[in-house]
Amino acid sequence: MTSHIITLELPENIYIRLQHAARATKQSLNDMLLRAIQTGSPPGWEDVPAEFQADLAALDRMDDR
């Protein structure tokens, strides 16, 4: 898998919360951030059967309000 380096500005309270969670679970901050991003990211389209992709695309365009 190819990796990319990014720079991300986090508010201090979020940084501290993630840093504490990383220490408590004996993970690196990088691993903690990757897990948080993976958990909060939408699923990949390649995991969805073809017959449902059009429906999911329509849902993706809907307004949350």
Image (tube, grey):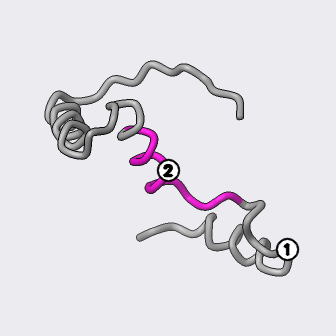
Q: Is residue 21 left or right of residue 47?
A: left
Q: Residues within 10 Å of mark 1 (few under 14, many from 20)?
A: few
> What is the magenta range?
33-44
Residue at image location 71% in from the left, 35% down from the top: 1
- The mark that comes first in sequence, 1 or 2, is 2
Estimate the x, y position of residue 20 in percent, counting from the top left. 16, 38
Does residue 42 appear to the left or right of 30 in the view shown? right
Tag 2: amino acid: Gln
Residue 36: % across, % down: 39, 48
Residue 36's disc is none
Q: Which residue is mark 2?
A: 38
Instruction: Please name the residue shown 73% across and 65% down the image.
Output: 47
Q: Is residue 49 left or right of residue 26?
A: right
- Name, please, the residue furthest toward the right: 50
Residue 55 in the magenta stretch? The answer is no
Would residue 58 appear left or right of 20 to someone viewing this image?
right
Residue at 20% from the left image edge and 36% from the top image edge? 23
Q: Front-most of 54 and 15?
A: 15
Q: Main secondary structure of the magenta part?
A: helix
Question: Does residue 32 lie above or below 44 as drawn?
Answer: above
Let me know if residue 39 is in the magenta part: yes
Q: Quadrant of residue 17?
A: top left
The part of the image, by quadrant, that contains residue 4 is top right
Residue topped by disc 1: 50
As drawn, 10 above or below 63: above
- Secondary element under disc 1, as helix, strand or loop, is helix
Amino acid beneath label 1: Ala
